[in-house]
Amino acid sequence: MDDVDRKILAELQDDGRLTVTELAARVRLSLSPCHRRLRELERSGAIRGYRAILDTQEVGLTFEALVFVTMRQEDRDTVADFEAAVADIPYVLQAQRLFGDPDYLLRIVSTDLPAFQRLYDEKLATLPGVMRLSSTLVMKHVVEERPLPL
């Protein structure tokens, strides 16, 4: 990956809806080489996909919590079952396995506190291998959806 590839990635992080023609102009390449580089970045996995970034408030998901998970068991099967079950919960926006204690950090959205409580009681508390859940509420987003520094 060279500086031109980094420029392409930076422009696409800023505006993923750019046409190849617009992208080529911004990175000062002709159309064909820009298109080739773009396809190679997609093929290599440097670009994982394209999506719209939605406003949680506008779509009614106004409640957000961070849930720390401590596992009772951490054998391979339990971890795999836990991770598969977490991946199936659409309100879990992010799930990260951590070193040390706690074992996982989940970023969860819901419509309100009662909806979060139902999700907590019916889904999170019943996940495989869970010993303890600890939650904290998000008060404010200070940095969000920041592009990667290239």
Image (spheres, rainbow, N blue to C red):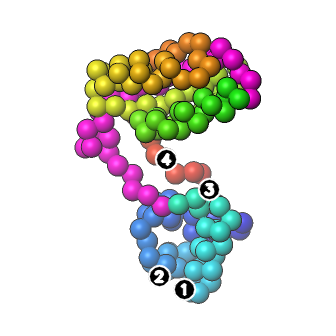
Tags 2 and 4 in contact by the CB under 8 Å rule? no
Which residue matches tag 1?
31
Q: Identity of the amino acid at label 1?
A: Leu
Residue 28 in the figure: left or right of residue 99: left
Quarter of the N terminus within the rendering: bottom right
Residue drawn where x is 44% and y is 76% of the image: 19
Label pair 3/4, CB-CB below 8 angstroms: no
Q: CA distance from mark 3 to mark 4?
A: 12 Å
Nearer the observer: mark 1 or 3; the answer is 1
Number of marks: 4
Q: Which residues are magenta?
A: 50-76
Q: What is the distance, in whole Å, between disc 2 and disc 3 at their CAs?
A: 22 Å
Compare residues 120 and 45 and report the one nearer the observer.
Answer: 120
> x%, y% of residue 90?
43, 39
Mark 2 / mark 3, whichever is N-terminal: 2
In the picture of the structure, the residue carrying the numbered disc 2 is 21
Query: At 46% from the left edge and 35% from the top edge, which residue is drawn?
Result: 89
Q: Residues within 10 Å of mark 3 (few under 14, many from 20)?
A: few
Q: Is residue 53 left or right of residue 78?
A: left
Give the residue number, with chain letter if any, for mark 4.
Answer: 146
